[in-house]
C-alpha cells in the first residue's frame, strides 16, 4: 500500500492561488491513477481532479477545468493540484488518493489509499 501526505493548503483571498502537493511513499513509482477529492463539513467527499498512470490523461469535475490543473511528477513521486482563481465555494479539506487501477475513475470506492487531507479556506 502507498502512503500519501498532502501539503500546501492554507488561507487565501478570493481570486488567489494555491498549489497542493501530495508526497507518495511506500510504493514507488506508484503506477496507478491518482486523484484529488474535497470535502466540506456535512457533505460527501467529491472528486476534484484525476490523472492516470503515467499522466497522459486528466479529468476535472464540472467547471473546475480551466481553474485547476492536476499533474504528477513520477520521478519525484509527487502529485500536484494547481488552483487558480479560487472562490469561497472552493473552501474544503482536500485529499490526495491513489486508485486500484491505472485508469482514473471518479468513485472514491475505487481508491485504496488516502492522505490525511489539507485544509483550503478561501475568504471573500
Image (cartoon, rainbow, N blue to C red):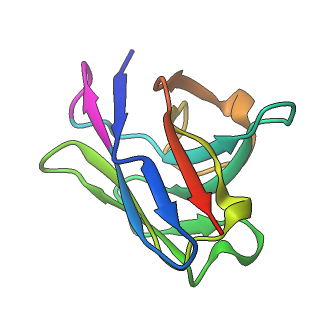
What x and y, as percent, mark residue 10? 43, 48
Q: Tell me if 92 is positioned left or right of 96 in this view.
A: right
Q: Tell me if 35 is positioned left or right of 27 in this view.
A: right
**Residue 51 colored magenta?**
no
Viewer-proximal residue, 49 or 27? 49
Residue at 46% x, 74% y is 16
Q: Is residue 117 above or below residue 77?
A: above
User: Where the C terminus falls, by quadrant?
Assistant: bottom right
Residue lying at the far top in this picture: please name it: 1
Viewer-proximal residue, 61 or 90? 90
Viewer-proximal residue, 40 or 114? 40
What x and y, as percent, mark residue 81? 42, 59
What x and y, as percent, mark residue 39? 71, 39
Viewer-proximal residue, 62 or 28? 62
User: Where the N terminus falls, by quadrant?
Assistant: top left
Q: Is residue 44 above or below residue 56?
A: above
Residue at 71% x, 34% y is 108
Q: Is residue 122 above or below residue 94?
A: below
Question: Looking at the rendering, which quadrant does residue 66 occupy?
Answer: bottom right
Q: Which residues are magenta?
A: 22-28
Amino acid at each position: 500500500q502507498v502512503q500519501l501526505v498532502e501539503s500546501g493548503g492554507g488561507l487565501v483571498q478570493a481570486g488567489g492561488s494555491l498549489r497542493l502537493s501530495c508526497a507518495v511513499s511506500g510504493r514507488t513509482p506508484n503506477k496507478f491513477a491518482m486523484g484529488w477529492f474535497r470535502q466540506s463539513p456535512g457533505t460527501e467527499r467529491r472528486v476534484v481532479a484525476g490523472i492516470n498512470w503515467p499522466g497522459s490523461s486528466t479529468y476535472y469535475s464540472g467547471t473546475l477545468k480551466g481553474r485547476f490543473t492536476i499533474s504528477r511528477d513520477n520521478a519525484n513521486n509527487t502529485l500536484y493540484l494547481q488552483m487558480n482563481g479560487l472562490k469561497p465555494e472552493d473552501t474544503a479539506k482536500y485529499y490526495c488518493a491513489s486508485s486500484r487501477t491505472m485508469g482514473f475513475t471518479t468513485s472514491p470506492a475505487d481508491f485504496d489509499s488516502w492522505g490525511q487531507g489539507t485544509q483550503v479556506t478561501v475568504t471573500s
